[in-house]
Image (cartoon, rainbow, N blue to C red):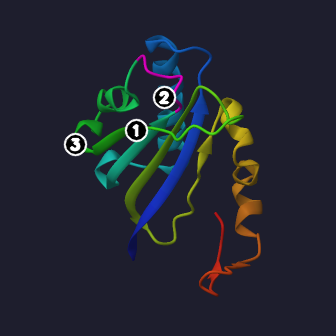
C-alpha cells in the first residue's frame, strides 16, 4: 500500500467567545474529523488552527492536546487574516497526515462554516464522480475531493 502526505481542511463556528463554546465546537470538529476519515493521531504530522480575530478565550490547540494521542502532534495556533464581511467567530484547521494514497479525504465544515465550502458538503460518492479540473497555473489535472 502506498502512503502519501495528505492535507485535510476543516472549519466550524462558535456562538460566543467563551472557553466553553470554543471547547464544544473544537471537540465536535475533531470528533467528526476522526470519525469521517478514520484518522489516528499517530498519522498526523502537524495541525495548524486559525481563528478569527474575535476569538481569544482559549487556544484550539490546547483543546486538541487534551485528546488521547494528540499530545505528540505538532500544533500551531494563528490568527486568521481579517477581511471585511468575512465569516465571524470561525475556527479553521489544516492537518497534514500520512495516509494511504487511495484513501478518500473528507474535509469537515460544520455549523455556519459549511457555507465556506459548499462543494465539500456533497456526499463522498458524488465528489468522487466529479470530473478532473484543468489547472490554469500548471496545466495539470486535479481532482477535488
The crowding category of the residue bearing disc 2, from other C-alpha atoms within 10 Å (few below 14, some 14 to 19, many at least 20), is: many
| 1 vs 2, front mark | 1
The residue to which callout 2 is attached is: 26
Mark 2 and mark 3 in contact? Answer it, CB < 8 Å: no
Q: Eyeballing the image, is 12 above or below 36? A: above
Name the residue tied to disc 3: 72
Earlier in the chain: of badge 2 and badge 3, it is 2
Residue positioned 75% across, 48% down in the render:
118
Is residue 5 found left or right of 73 in the rendered image?
right
Q: Quadrant of the N terminus?
A: bottom left
At x 24%, y 36%, the residue is 71
Image height of 57 relative to 104, above or below: above
Within 10 Å of disc 3 (Cα), the crowding (few <14, some 14-19, many 20+) is few
Q: Secondary structure at mark 2?
A: helix
Q: Is residue 142 left or right of residue 18?
A: right
- In the rendered image, the vertical position of residue 94 relative to residue 4, given as above or below: above
Identify the main secondary structure in magenta.
loop
The x, y position of residue 90, in whole percent, is: 58, 31
Across and down, in percent, residue 31 comes to 49, 34
Q: Quadrant of residue 109?
A: top right
Quarter of the figure with residue 110:
top right
Write the start and end of the magenta stretch as one range: 52-57
Instruction: Point out residue 64 in the picture as x, y percentages from the top left corner.
Output: 36, 32
**What is the C-alpha distance between the residues marked 1 and 2?**
15 Å
Direction from residue 110 to residue 105 in the image, left or right: left
Amino acid at each position: 500500500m502506498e502512503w502519501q502526505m495528505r492535507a485535510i481542511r476543516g472549519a466550524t463556528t462558535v456562538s460566543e467567545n467563551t472557553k466553553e463554546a470554543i471547547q464544544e465546537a473544537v471537540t465536535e470538529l475533531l470528533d467528526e474529523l476522526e470519525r469521517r476519515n478514520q484518522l489516528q493521531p499517530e498519522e498526523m504530522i502537524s495541525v495548524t488552527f486559525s481563528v478569527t480575530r474575535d476569538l481569544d478565550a482559549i487556544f484550539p490547540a490546547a483543546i486538541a492536546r487534551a485528546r488521547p494521542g494528540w499530545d505528540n502532534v505538532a500544533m500551531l495556533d494563528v490568527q486568521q487574516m481579517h477581511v471585511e464581511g468575512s465569516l465571524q467567530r470561525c475556527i479553521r484547521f489544516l492537518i497534514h497526515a500520512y495516509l494511504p494514497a487511495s484513501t478518500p479525504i473528507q474535509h469537515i465544515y460544520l455549523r455556519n462554516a459549511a457555507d465556506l465550502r459548499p462543494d465539500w458538503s456533497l456526499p463522498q460518492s458524488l465528489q468522487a464522480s466529479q470530473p478532473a479540473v484543468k489547472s490554469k497555473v500548471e496545466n495539470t489535472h486535479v481532482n477535488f475531493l
